Image (cartoon, grey):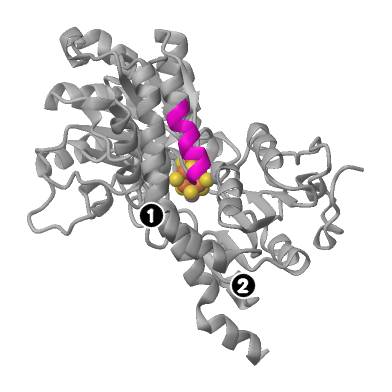
Amino acid sequence: MPYYQMRCNLCIPERNKHTVIVDEDKSIIPESNAPTVPGDMTERGCAFAGARGVVGGPIVDVIHMIHAPVGCGYYTWGTRRHLGDGYNWAMPGVLENEANHRRHCYTTAMTEQDIVFGGMEKLKNALLEAFKINPGASAAIIYMTCSTALIGDDIENVAKEVSKIVGKPVFACASPGFCGVSQSKGHHEFNFQFYKWLLKYREEHPEVCLKEEEKTPYDVNLIGDYNIDWDLVTIVPLFEKIGVRVLNVFTGNSRFMNLLKLPDAKLNIVHCQRSATYIAELIRQGFDIPFIRVSLFGIEQTAKALRDTAEWFGDEKMKKRAEEVIEEETEAIRPAIEWYRERLAGKRIAIYVGAPRVWHWPKVMEELGMEVVACMTTFGHKEDYEKIVQRVKPGTLIIDNPNEFEIEEMIETCKPDLFLTGLKEKYLVRKFGVPTLNSHSYEAGPYAGFRGLVNFARDIYQALYAPVWRLAKEEF
Ligand code: CFM
């Protein structure tokens, strides 16, 4: 029996196949991407959250119209710090980092009556009103959620109608929560539908494509980075320094019209390989543009990403430049990292995030001298777990889509010194005297790239050594 029996699951045996202990030959992975067992208090989000909150949301200069009852509008802002600087067309006096896409909610606020009689007219009027209030918006994206999908509102037709009236693109994304088992399905839907729409739009409006004379042999897209707490500031210059041009980021701090040029690059560099490999794969199939997979956290992985990029271009000058950049950057952070490593050495870490960061980070923890004792993902697929088990030591506990009881038992059995996790678990975990660190939106990022690692190490250090934990332990 390869699975690990948690005590809390004795009465819910369906959960057993989602919990494993990594073995010596790393052959066992938990079952994943499966429907949550009824009665299990999952922490998963819905497909709409994946489409709106994760992939579409970071686009800064569009109206994100949520065609749904007002409750779904919760996912509009404040839920994830995918920052942007596109506030030039928002109201005067807006604060930095409060770009329009995060500051405003646009929703049709469907009522019972609209559900009975249909909401297409309401959607059309809402879009026209939103474009009128925000004349600087480049485009609009309509997101459909469970209720409007169930009544079958034809959002594509409304998109076409409004687009004709305002003369700007309107993309309709059908992302009802029920279309999948987690937010992961929403990533998938956004990728596929956007790509399909983009192909048609480029065909009808060839002027939006990158002109031949504007192309360079070193144009790349960074796919699957969402500029969490300005990660792009520590990532993009690294690529620019080795001599590539980052044409587009899908979708961190991106502009809608620029995204239409996605297929005009020479190479796609995929960072989040859960939420965005789909579009890289579609572009590969449709335009013969290859992609490489990278990890942009920690020294070794970021260095590898730069080397792999230079290697792909096969350009000797770029390869040399990559080595110089790696050397320069590593030297710049070495004293700080050494200081932190001394203080973090031997600490036991549990990681629970969506999926990719759970395999991006074990190497990073190693670089800081720490040990990963437990790994959990909300919506990981088989490939994510394969990567996780390759990167952790035998004996590590892995839980797919954990619930509160499993997290409690994990704390008791694995005894982590720090839990890299999100806000939903934070209070529960802290009650056990275990510090947490906001691993989705960060405490004070960026965390990516070489320079980001110093911030990451600092936040880990501060979480671990906050005097409150000593006091809390004395109390009990
Ligand atoms: Fe990709 Fe992400 Fe993640 Fe993700 Fe997320 Fe995120 Fe995440 Mo939170 S896009 S899958 S849906 S790397 S919001 S920036 S941290 S769960 S591991």
Task: Identify the image quadrant of residue 351.
Answer: bottom right
Where residue 26 sits: x, y (%)?
A: 79, 38
Q: Is residue 319 above or below residue 36?
A: above
Q: Judge whether residue 420 can be spotted in this image.
A: yes
Element on which disc 1 rests: helix
> Where does the image place residue 343, in percent across and percent down from the top left?
55, 69
For ligand 1, tell me if the residue under mark 2 lies within 8 Å: no
Q: Which residue is mark 2?
A: 434
Q: Give coordinates of residue 227: x percent, y percent.
A: 35, 44
SS class of the residue under badge 2?
Answer: loop
- Horizontally, residue 259 falls left or right of residue 86, namely right
Residue type (three-letter) at the residue carrying disc 2: Val
Query: Any magenta on residue 300?
Result: yes
Q: Position of residue 386 (x, y in %)?
A: 69, 35
Amino acid carrying label 1: it is Tyr
**Does the rendering let one see residue 154?**
no
Taking 95 as reference, is 108 left or right? right
Q: Which residue is located at x 43 percent, y 59 percent?
A: 335
Which residue is rendered at x = 75% and y = 41% of the image? 30
Give the mark, 2 or 1, whose residue is nearer the N terminus.
Answer: 1
Q: Residues within 10 Å of mark 1 (few under 14, many from 20)?
A: some
**Residue at label 1?**
74
Q: Is residue 196 magenta?
A: no
Bounds of the magenta span? 298-307
Q: Residues within 10 Å of mark 2 (few under 14, many from 20)?
A: many
The quadrant the N terminus occupies is top right
| In the depicted structure, whether residue 283 falls above or below residue 368 | above
Residue at 48% in and 23% down: 292
Q: Quadrant of the C terminus?
A: bottom right
Q: Residue at x 45, y 20 (%)?
A: 311
